[in-house]
Image (spheres, rainbow, N blue to C red):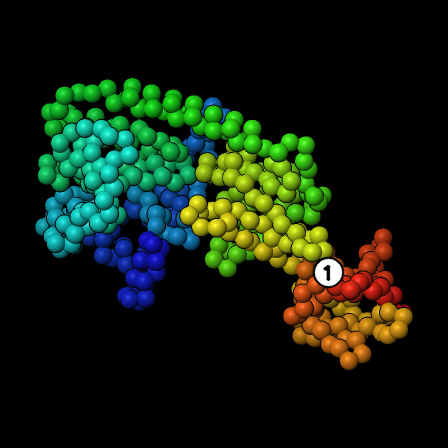
Amino acid sequence: MYLAAGYLAEHLTGSTWEELVQRRLLGPLGMGRANFSVAATQKDRDHARPYRRQGGKVVEIPFRDLTAIGPAGSINASVREMARWVMLHLQGGEVDGTRLLAREAIADLHTVRMPMPSARPNPELIGVGYASGWMVDVYRGHRRVHHGGNIDGFSAMVTLLPDAGFGFCVLTNLDACGMHEMVVRQLTDRLLGLEPKDWKSEALSRRKQADGMEQKGKEGARAERRTGTSPSHPLAEYAGDYEHPGYGRGRIELRDGVLRADFHGLGGRLEHWHFDVFAYGDDADSPELAGMKLMFTTDFEGEIDALRVVLEPSTPAIVFARQPDARLRDAAFLRTLVGDYDLGTMVATIALQGEGLVLTLPGQRHELEPGRGLVFSMHGLSGYSVRFVADAAGKVTGLRVRQPEGVFEAVRKP
């Protein structure tokens, strides 16, 4: 939705969302080092690098490029400059005597729109709800307006205590790190003179419990795995490009005997789970992917034609359709298939028309749509296809016309 807001702002103002935010907010706030891409961040003389816990160790990981959904989280800034953003909210939309937002607008942003009671009853931390881009709760009797953020290798927390006039910004360069919230609580207790509480021990206890539950969950998943099964095809036949009209194109590759998935830079190693279901390994590019399953499906000819993956639990599995092999759209390659093929009782002619092939039979003409390998489907006809046959040297020597009533072979004429 933030992506949609940024896109709409561009159409309303005629500026890119980056130019708009720079001119209306970052510039007036004095946030001169703030930028909109990880590429710009890495050019800064003093920048943090991303880390993640993996295999019991903390390891450095690549930066995650968020350009495609920039308005939803691609602004990078230092903690000193983020303090200016905090001041803007605490001072009702004004910084250094300059008003950037109406006081009413700031109050509106902090007003709860969606009630969200606490999942775990805790008298010291009472959930209230979600405002416009902010969470609202009551911490030990004091209203808080806050929001955290996590992206590969980084975790952040911005917290406001509007009634007390305090605000905090804590930035960490560790994936899914809960330290920022502990820092905010410690600072809040000190500034407001509240009775000290050992938040760290409580957090470590919860983390240990969560790690134990995660391990039990993995063991439970393995127990449901159907043993003794194998993929229905050689691994090489699963490799290819897969596309969805909303989620775009992803790729499955076979490297060193192992399938790997890549969807817009997110992916990782796939291990066979059971039948034609594969699962991401624990070393996936993002922790959220670990254990996620992908299921490949086949068409009536037994060809891999799609993969299904649950990307959003509240919707049915997303289906990515297998895309044709690139060479089947290459005019130079298609010309090697052109010619007459003898079916015995008639001659089938393959001709190049525009960027595709056309099959002509007596009284029939069919446009061919590229598939995989040397297979083409007939446009508008289900269950009808043409498969070219090649010898060991790769030279096309014939074709097979597939129809529901049978398969008819033809020999290429000299």
Estimate the x, y position of residue 196 in percent, counting from the top left. 17, 20
Decide which of 33, 115 is in the foreground and name it.
115
Estimate the x, y position of residue 50 in percent, counting from the top left. 41, 35
Image quadrant containing the C terminus: bottom right
Q: Is residue 191 above or below residue 296?
A: above
Quick check: 373 left or right of 314? right
Residue at horizontal 50 percent and vertical 59 percent from the top = 245
> According to the image, label 1 marks what residue?
375
Decide which of 206, 363 is in the foreground and name it.
363
Q: Is residue 264 visible?
A: no
Image quadrant containing the N terminus: bottom left
Q: Is residue 354 visible?
A: yes
| Residue lying furthest front | 405
Residue at horizontal 33 percent and vertical 33 percent from the top = 172
Quick check: 189 left or right of 40? left
Estimate the x, y position of residue 164 in percent, counting from the top left. 10, 36
Residue at horizontal 51 percent and vertical 39 percent from the top = 292
